[in-house]
Image: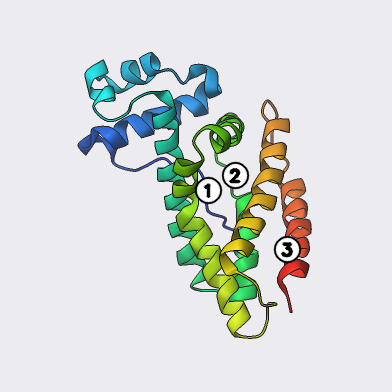
Amino acid sequence: METAYPTLFTAPENPDGDRTRLLIRTAYDLLDESGLEGLTIRAVLARAGLARRAFYERFQGKDDLVLAVFDSSLRAAALQFREITERCDGPLSALRTIVTGIVVGQLGQDRMGANRRGAALSREHLRLAQTRPSELNSALEPLLDLIAGHVGDGMAQGLFREADPQLQARLIYNLVSTTVHTVLLAEEEGVPDRTGREQLATQLWDFCRRAVVA
């Protein structure tokens, strides 16, 4: 039986009642189908059946839409990880679940779609980290806060060495996400190797564990 990992980039559900969610969902679908090349404002509006005014009432441009995709999907991922880690037997297990989930959770039912989307968002993540750092950091906050919470619990229980939990959370996330970005870009036009991903997740977790344990 396969391990259940949350998917990091999850499209918002039930978009029909809210045009913002509809635009985000449409962007997500276009990334699945054709990556960054297919994600244009014209394509989003044509697929969503909306006028340009509907887009510019909500977003100033394409970057704002991509940031909204990050914000929506990463908040959903943080919520999923929170629900999963509530069932873990301690902070060490919870942190391992998050680290391995970030690596393996990129795999979706539509493997090629997941690859195109993951590679596209990886490129945008790296670019927006330079051009729109405050907005990207805002999107990451729920996930970083969750990681920091488990790190803090580990320190309180004497399992982890004393340090700044928020800094530790960011270091862990940056290490894991940067590694995953590299893998996603390499796999963009191929079928991801789940076994290879799980082995990588184990190696990354072992590195992170050694870095935080007391």
* Residue at which label 2 appears: 106
Q: CA distance from mark 1 to mark 2?
A: 6 Å
| Residue shown at 50% from the left, 27% from the top | 31
Q: Nearer the viewer, residue 181 or 163?
A: 163
Q: Residue at x 68, y 25 (%)?
A: 189
Secondary element type, mark 3 = helix
First in sequence, mark 1 or 2: give its number.
Answer: 1
- Work out whether 67 lies above or below 211: above
Mark 3 — residue?
208
- 169 or 187, nearer to the observer: 169
Label 2: state its secondary structure: loop
x and y percentages locating residue 62 in the rendered image: 41, 24
Q: Amino acid at mark 3?
A: Cys
- Disc 3 crowd rating (10 Å Cα; few below 14, some 14-19, many 20+) is many
Q: Residue at x 66, y 58 (%)?
A: 172
Q: Identify which amino acid the numbered label 2 is placed on.
A: Gln
Q: On the rendered image, what quadrant is the N terminus found in?
A: bottom right
Q: CA distance from mark 2 to mark 3?
A: 19 Å
Colour basis: rainbow
Kindly identify which numbered label has been placed on residue 7: 1
The quarter of the image holding the C terminus is bottom right
Residue 105 visible within the image: yes
| Mark closer to the chain start, 2 or 3 | 2
Q: Are marks 3 and 1 in contact (CB under 8 Å)?
A: no
